[in-house]
Amino acid sequence: MAPSAVEEPVAAAAAPAATSPAAVATDNRPRILVPEKVSPDGLAMLQDHCQVDIRLGLSAEELLQTIPSYNGLIVRSETKVTAAVLAAGRKLRVVARAGVGVDNIDVDAATTHGIIVVNSPAGNIRAAAEHTVALLLATARNIGRADTTMKEGKWARSSLVGVEVGGKVLGIVGLGKVGMQVARMAKGLGMRVVAYDPYASPEVARSAGVELVANTAGAPGNEKSGLDALLPQVDFLTIHTPLLATTLNLLDEAQFKAMKPAARVLNVARGGVYNEEALVNALDNGWIAGAGIDVFTSEPVKPDPEGKSWAARLAAHPKVVATPHLGASTVEAQENVSLDVCAQMRTILRGGLPTAAVNAPLILPEEYRKLQPYVRLVERMGSLYTQHFSRASRPGSLSGSRRPRRRFELVYRGELADVANTRPLFAALVKGLVSSVTDAGGRDVNIVNATLIAKEKGLAIRETHDRSEGGSGVSLRAQADDEPEASTSATPSGEEDGPALAPVDDAPAALATVAAPAAATTLPDEIIEGYVSGKSIYISRVDRFVANFVPEGTLLVLHNYDEPGKIGHVGMALGRHGINITFMHVASVDRSGAVRRRSVTTGTENEALMILGVDGPAVTPAVIDDLRESEGILDVSLVRLRPPRPCQRRLRHDAVKLDVRHQRVQRRIVLLRPDVAQDRQAQVRAVKVVRKGAQNVHLGRARLVLVERVVPNRHDHGVQAGHGGRLVRVVGRTLVGELGRHAIANDAVGLGGSSLARARGLEHGPAKVDAGHAVGDPGRGLGVDG
């Protein structure tokens, strides 16, 4: 998403942002909801790109009612982002957790809806580790009780004797980033550190002086797990794991009984990894000596006079040093996580990829840039296949399979074969295959939910990397199923779901396989091939036919005999319905032998495909029937693909115009893509245009317009024009607009009729100079450098 042209300050984190309904109606920027306190440092970076609404203290019902109009949501630990909230967020694209843990977010539901969940795994590592050590020391020296008795006016020195931590054993469960930081700090205190983490690297642990306890569960003669082996030897225990089904109540009564009576436990991770009832019993019965707890199963912990809440009883226990979830509550940590998640939020809403997505793969920026044009290509190939091959038509015709095929193979060649992470291409294929047969209100398909949707639709997709010599490109092969089933066709409702297929056991590790059992059929594969040239995408093969066309807009694909007169008949038929042909391409049968087979319809090779780009009135079934009745036409399919992108290199007079009359800007400045940026302050002297990669800058009279803060790009040539002592700075090689009656375009510079005007820095010099009263009139003292 590109930034807006209007700058509005972000509201302070301490108060909700007030946004008028009129402003919301006219502001096309993405909207972000912030229902909890988040450091303003991160929110400030969103001010030029998004509309940030800070609404603290929303109830669950209010959140459900509010979320439908927002594109992004930033939360901490208190807001519960449930499946109902995610389902209600019809525009929601990303949920950002300003912190590490995401157990307050239904990640599975987010994945189902294609919503990216991001967090900040590194922003508060030091803060959490330091708080763990603080609780360790506080429990060792009875700091909590000492503080309480002092405030009560008591001097209970003799009853508050503690223990030293030097020489003691610290046990760590979960040797991740926080756990490793705690280990290093504990080593600095002279402690021996023993850890249990089945996924930890022995080399990394050894380098930090940490002893790893092996998981020996199930070994002959030794049924102890690594955790069971760890607990009896530790004096202090801290857990740093997420709250999962496997870590819920990780320590119960049996585990507490296995520990030393003088042992103390710490929790700065997640409430629930210790069974709170068992922990209270362990403290009451003397199974362990104390605890330092920062997180609870129910937060915030509320007073419970009746003693029914184990979280409340634990927080009030005299042997517990309790803090109200302060693990990440430092100024530095709040700034770090805010900056991190806000940067990811901005990147995702502008079409980029996150750096710490919980439910999406990590893709390097350089890989993503290489894949971008291929993503468009593969999506169009999938959509072309669904609309051309899978629509039931004449039995045996090229565009009329008896039923939609669900087994596909994507073959990557050339530079694509060396790209390890092709998840965006997998997602693009799924999107193309299902988008044309799914209702408009269906889920968007992206890298988050592509695998899930493929399984729901019963699609089996294999990805193959072909490193043999040859040009770069992509092949899509649709394979016939091995088991016959009733004849079906894709329907607009998209309810033709089949069973999900299991992955192939013998698939190579390099292949990202959803499912691809071997097909036992003699039916040939249906093939579409394409390639990328520059940033343009092309289809180079449609089954037996060699082609070369751009897959965009509305296409009519005609399967016909390759005989004289066919083009004329088709043109006349479309003309009768008032349909204009924008381009035409004839694809002949491949006679090279690459895909050499006879037609299942005619038994001959005297056939061709005619691909027509059309516009004008809608192509109705009557038009299709008229074409099919034309002599020599075997079949017709209508394919609707995404329209071509708006031109960004020339003036579109029907869409963009800057009118200057009476020395005042009478109309708003509208860029070629109104969704990218608009000036909403007409009749002003200072026009702020912030557009990354902009090549077009629209000017009025030089003395009325000041263009500021144009984001640099590789096409900048620093054109400058002065007028009457006032400076107009224009960044961008191509200038388009309208100055009075004189248009300026290409490399032209409009100088507005000044005898002092001077232009500098044009790479090739101006193609035309408009001095207001005369074009290039040297009599007005025009000076040009460059």
Image (cartoon, rainbow, N blue to C red):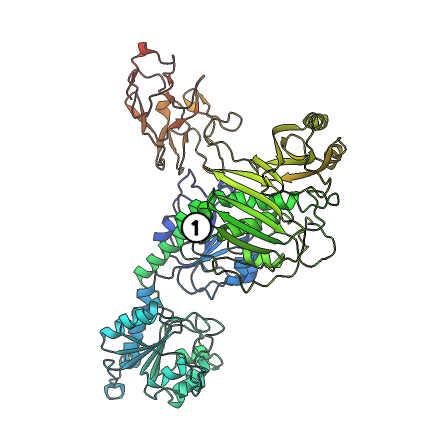
Q: What residue is shown at x 63% (from left), y 54% (from top)?
A: 406
User: Circle 1 is placed at which residue position?
Assistant: 418
Camera-side residue of 53 and 195: 195
**Image position of 417 with respect to 588: above or below:** below
Q: Can residue 92 be seen by looking at this rendering?
A: no
- Do we see residue 81 in this rendering? yes
In which quarter of the view is residue 195 placed?
Answer: bottom left
* Residue positioned most to the front: 593
Residue at the far right in the pictured view:
629
394 vs 190, left or right, is right
Q: Residue furthest bottom?
A: 285
- Number of disc labels: 1
> 474 and 207: which one is in front?
474
Horizontal and vertical percent position of residue 329 = 34, 64
* Secondary structure of residue under mark 1: helix
- Who's the residue at 40% across and 85% down the image? 256
